[in-house]
């Protein structure tokens, strides 16, 4: 299978840099798949599960938060606020964060605080999903 270069960068670390056979990212419009020689594009990324396959390997998963993706000349650059492999996720902390986000949404102090809580809940749910998928 053909491959392409990918750089998955979070604000605090490099999640993965190297060759990739396929990539699936969460976008506001659903899951977006990329293979080698994809047309050039720029796309928003939302909290969810990112899936990538290294040449000759199995699918790798990561819980990601909001970010951007640029595809140009068979090279993909992904910039994210946060990204975690399943084994790095502390499920108890994630459940606590989800509960806190739900509580903040119920308080409805301002639209800004509501949207921040909504984003925190989306991130917590995506982290739980990636953790669950890895432990199946």
Image (spheres, grey):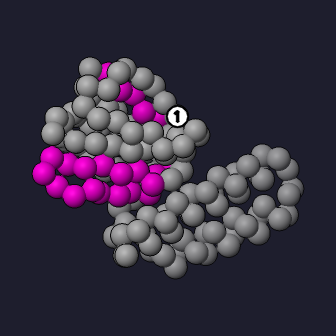
Highlighted range, magenta: 49-72
**Quarter location, residue 133:** bottom left
Please provide percent x and percent y for residue 97.
61, 69
Please check the rendered image and state whether residue 65 is part of the magenta-colored stretch, yes or no.
yes
* Residue 57 visible in the snapshot: yes
Q: Viewer-proximal residue, 33 or 17?
A: 33
Q: Viewer-proximal residue, 32 or 47?
A: 32
Determine the residue positioned at 58% across, 75% down.
95
Determine the residue positioned at 82% across, 47% down.
111
**Quarter location, residue 75:** top left
Q: Viewer-proximal residue, 23 or 121?
A: 23
Determine the residue positioned at 39% across, 28% down.
70
Secondary structure under the numbered disc 1 in the rendered image: strand
Please provide percent x and percent y for residue 45.
50, 40
Location of the N terminus by quadrant is: top left
Dominant secondary structure of the magenta stretch? strand
38 horizontally vs 120: left or right: left
Residue sitting at the far bottom: 92
Q: Is residue 26 above or below residue 60?
A: above
Determine the residue positioned at 85% across, 50% down.
110
Please check the rendered image and state whether residue 120 is part of the magenta-colored stretch, yes or no.
no
**Quarter location, residue 86:** bottom left
Residue to which mark 1 is pinned: 44
Please provide percent x and percent y for residue 35.
29, 35
Please provide percent x and percent y for residue 16.
26, 48
């Amino acid at each position: 299978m053909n491959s392409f270069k990918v750089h998955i960068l979070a604000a605090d670390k490099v999640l993965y840099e190297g060759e990739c056979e396929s990539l699936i990212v969460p976008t506001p419009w659903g899951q977006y798949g990329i293979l080698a020689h994809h047309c050039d594009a720029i796309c928003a990324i939302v909290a969810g599960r990112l899936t990538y396959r290294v040449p000759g390997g199995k699918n790798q998963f990561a819980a990601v938060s909001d970010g951007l993706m640029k595809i140009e000349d068979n090279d993909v650059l992904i910039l994210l606020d946060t990204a975690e492999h399943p084994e790095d996720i502390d499920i108890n902390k994630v459940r606590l964060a989800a509960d806190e986000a739900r509580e903040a949404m119920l308080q409805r102090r301002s639209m800004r605080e509501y949207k921040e809580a909504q984003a925190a809940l989306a991130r917590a749910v995506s982290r739980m999903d990636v953790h669950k998928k890895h432990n199946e």
